[in-house]
Image (tube, rainbow, N blue to C red):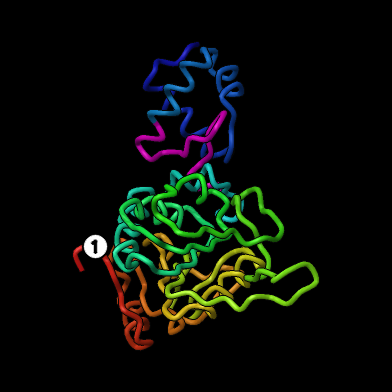
């Protein structure tokens, strides 16, 4: 028996949640409807926050492990929160500054919010930033080399540039490192799921006069595989909502300035 639209969407949402990841073709066959109909169902469920729409299908917002989420999925996760964080982060950056941005969708949002900045020097391992940022914004834009992680569209490797083939490395220093992390907790500090990413983020911090850590409120109270730094390594913690009391107290005890919308 064919499902009515509302009933189909409800059943579809349950099926995606149980399966974790599905394709449009798989769903069209399962429910006996056209691919265009399934696409409309998925678009509506994505808008309602029930699942996350991806190219060619969808994933469950709850069943898919965070470490397995590709960039196309994470672009939809906490999108409004990331935009608010990015707007606040951009306000810390004066024209002419030298900045480092790590990989991630939050720092990608920061790059978009730099549209009115000028004469910046930007260094990043985020492979999407060069395509997202206007040439009017920067004087120089550098992408660090290394191994490419296709799932995050980023490089992992040393924060370095050589003078010439076989020559020494140029010492690098920036005014501000903007580091998006996967988790933050009072005891675990700032952490991420990948060891190579953690090493690169920690090195960016070490080369910065000031450090701003960026994390939306879904990252509060969590600890992932690799610690990037202890809380006090940051000068600013930029987020979309007030942290829970224990995390807020730990940040303040570590002399970290908490920046939130309207805060």
Residue beneath disc 1: 261
Does 76 appear above or below 143?
above
Membership of 77 in magenta stretch: no
Q: Nearer the viewer, residue 19 or 99?
A: 99
Q: Element type at marker 1?
A: loop
Q: Please identify the quadrant where the C terminus is shown.
A: bottom left
Q: Quadrant of residue 254?
A: bottom left
Q: Residue at x 45, y 69 (%)?
A: 98
Q: Is residue 50 above or below residue 135?
A: above
Where's residue 102, x and y in %? 52, 63
Asked if residue 28 is positioned above or below residue 79 in the image, the reply reads above
Q: Is residue 262 left or right of residue 190?
A: left
Q: Nearer the viewer, residue 213 or 36?
A: 213
Residue 59, image x, y percentages = 53, 39
Nearest the camera: 69 or 91? Answer: 91
Decide which of 128, 225 is in the foreground and name it.
Answer: 128
Residue furthest right as drawn: 166
Q: Which residues are magenta?
A: 45-65
């Amino acid at each position: 028996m064919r499902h009515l639209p509302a009933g189909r969407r409800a059943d579809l949402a349950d099926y995606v949640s149980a399966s974790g990841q599905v394709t449009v073709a798989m769903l069209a066959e399962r429910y006996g409807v056209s691919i265009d109909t399934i696409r409309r169902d998925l678009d509506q469920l994505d808008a309602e926050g029930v699942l996350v729409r991806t190219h060619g299908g969808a994933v469950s917002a709850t069943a898919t492990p965070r470490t397995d989420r590709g960039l196309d999925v994470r672009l939809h996760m906490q999108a409004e929160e990331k935009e608010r964080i990015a707007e606040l982060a951009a306000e810390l950056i004066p024209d002419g500054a030298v900045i480092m941005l790590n990989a991630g969708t939050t720092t990608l949002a920061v790059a978009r919010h730099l549209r009115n900045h000028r004469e910046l020097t930007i260094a990043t391992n985020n492979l999407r930033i060069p395509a997202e940022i206007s040439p009017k914004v920067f004087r120089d834009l550098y992408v660090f080399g290394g191994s490419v992680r296709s799932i995050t569209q980023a490089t992992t490797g040393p924060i370095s540039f050589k003078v010439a083939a076989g020559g020494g490395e140029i010492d690098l220093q920036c005014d501000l490192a903007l580091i998006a992390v996967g988790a933050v907790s009072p005891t675990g500090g700032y952490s991420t799921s990948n060891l190579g990413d953690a090493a690169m983020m920690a090195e960016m911090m070490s080369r910065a006069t000031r450090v701003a850590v960026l994390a939306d409120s879904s990252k509060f109270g969590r600890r992932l595989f690799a610690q990037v730094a202890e809380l006090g390594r940051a000068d600013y913690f930029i987020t979309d909502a007030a942290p829970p009391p224990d995390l807020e107290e730990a940040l303040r005890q570590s002399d970290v300035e908490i920046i939130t919308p309207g805060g």
